[in-house]
Amino acid sequence: MTEIDPRALRNAFGAFMTGVTVVTTHDQDGNPLGFTANSFTSVSLDPPLVLVCLANSSRNYDAFYQADGFAVNVLAEDQKEVSNTFARPVEDRFAAVNWQKGPHGAPVFDGVSAWFDCATFNRVEAGDHLILIGEVKAFENATHPGLGYARGAYVTPAAEAEALSRGSTLKVSALIAHEGKVLLSGDDKGQLVLPEVKVGKGGATAALKQLIAASGVIAEPGFIYAVYEDDACETQHITFLCQASGGTPSSGIFTELSESTLMSVADPAVCTMLSRFAEESRMGDFGVYYGNQVSGEVRPLTKGD
């Protein structure tokens, strides 16, 4: 039997786009508990059942296993920080969100796309996770667009569509890497640039596929590596990190990110991003940049359990 690489398998699982939830309950002392999860799905309408998965290694494992109920809060697009807070070992996670007890008693959040307050219906131990099946006792469905998650990064389709409707320019670029090198080409001034295209009505995913097809290389669409705004040009940028597996570039070459190479990169924001990529590649630990062309923050990829 072929041995499966857990990291590669996790990356493959990440190709399936999901929503983002925070699952909540109370411990035996009445203290609220919660964790970020994207392993959530509906199970049945009659009876109304949903399920979530909790890692056996979670510090909340015992409390959720023993609880007689839990709530699933489906996060909205503007609640990335809520997701990040409940994915980290923060002392008081609930200080970052407005919440109240749901009809069945579990904490439900304000401003979410939807919430489901459940009674524990069944518990199934499966590998390195616990599957919690809940019977929905109450729920609320709001109109807020839901936050998405794919390939280790957040996805905000509604925000993207809104940017296009406002007339803002949205551009997608591809950081295509192969054996430690990055695909770069020269602009009309002889400076180095990443493959980039303006996003049309087909959206960012279609634009990325167009970029990869035009590059001539064989590469899979990867996760979002940077999201930033260029206020001066009223342009929003999304950069995807993609790994090439073959093919010959139709334009540009795979280039080592040496100091001289970085000095030849046209856009200072892209230069900074490539410097970060070179460092993160050496460390084997990647993050996602959020901000503008001058300043922002790099957030570690959320694991979701």
Image (cartoon, helix red, strand yellow):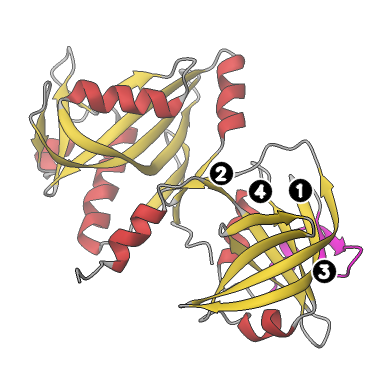
Which residue was labeled with disc 3? Answer: 106
Q: Which residues are magenta?
A: 92-109
The image quadrant where one finds the C terminus is: bottom right
Q: Is residue 72 above or below residue 243?
A: below
Q: Are marks 4 and 1 in contact (CB under 8 Å)?
A: no
Which residue was labeled with disc 2? Answer: 148
Which residue was labeled with disc 4? Answer: 79
Mark toward the start of the polypeptide (2 vs 3): 3
Q: CA distance from mark 2 to mark 1?
A: 14 Å
Q: Is residue 107 visible?
A: yes
- Can you tell which quarter of the image residue 24 is in? bottom right
Relative to 179, 88 lies left or right = right
Mark toward the start of the polypeptide (3 vs 4): 4
The residue located at (12%, 21%) in the rendering is 251
The residue located at (69%, 79%) in the rendering is 64
For numbered disc 4, what is the local secondary structure? loop
Q: Are marks 1 and 3 in contact (CB under 8 Å)?
A: no
Q: Are marks 2 and 3 in contact (CB under 8 Å)?
A: no
Q: Position of residue 257 (x, y in %)?
A: 14, 43
Which residue was labeled with disc 1? Answer: 114
Identify which residue, 105 or 287, lies in the foreground.
Answer: 105
Packing grade of label 2 (10 A; few <14, some 14-19, many >=20) is many
Q: CA distance from mark 2 to mark 4?
A: 11 Å
Question: Given the image, on which type of amino acid does mark 2 rest?
Answer: Gly
The image quadrant where one finds the N terminus is: bottom left
Question: Given the image, on which type of amino acid does mark 1 rest?
Answer: Ala
Relative to 206, 169 lies left or right = right
